[in-house]
Image: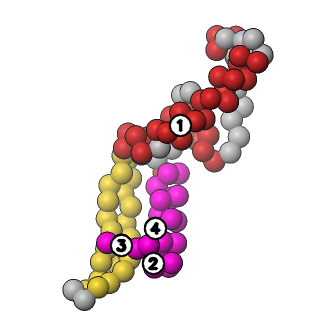
């Protein structure tokens, strides 16, 4: 299904993706369910897709790796090792992703 020209469908898909991202912060898998996302000459189309945390983290691997760079730079600049850190305060929505917390 090509939804690139359907603004309303893209909005629904974006909202469902955000919801799935939040859910995967606390559970191992979730289901993206979008009934009647669009229609064609054969009738209405639906999306129902299970997404696991492992698959989500694989899809986001490049972004996760990019988050590690400033952390390592801060440690280097401060002349510290990971073992020197007792506590880290994480701020922002993406910091709830377990893969980010494990950096």
Query: In this rendering, does residue 28 appear at all?
Result: no
**Residue holding disc 1:** 64
**Residue range highlighted in magenta:** 1-22
- Earlier residue among tags 2 and 4: 2
The residue that appears at 56% across and 27% down in the rendered structure is 103
- Earlier residue among tags 1 and 3: 3
Judging from the image, what secondary structure is the residue with disc 2 in?
loop
Say whether residue 29 is left or right of residue 92.
left
View extreme (right): residue: 78
Q: Residue 20's mark?
A: none
Disc 3 + disc 2, Cβ < 8 Å: yes
Q: Quadrant of residue 84?
A: top right
Judging from the image, what secondary structure is the residue with disc 4 in?
helix
**Residue holding disc 4:** 13
Choose mark 4 or mark 3, whichever is in front: 3
Residue 77, position in %: x, y? 76, 18
**Residue holding disc 2:** 5
Judging from the image, what secondary structure is the residue with disc 3 in?
loop
């Amino acid at each position: 299904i090509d939804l690139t020209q359907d603004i309303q469908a893209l909005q629904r898909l974006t909202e469902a993706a955000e919801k799935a991202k939040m859910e995967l912060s606390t559970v191992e898998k979730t289901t993206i369910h979008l009934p009647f996302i669009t229609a064609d000459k054969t009738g209405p189309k639906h999306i129902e897709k299970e997404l696991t945390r492992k698959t989500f983290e694989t899809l986001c691997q490049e972004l996760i790796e990019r988050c590690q760079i400033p952390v390592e730079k801060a440690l280097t600049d401060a002349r510290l090792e990971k073992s020197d850190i007792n506590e880290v305060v994480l701020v922002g929505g993406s910091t709830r992703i377990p893969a980010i917390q494990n950096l």
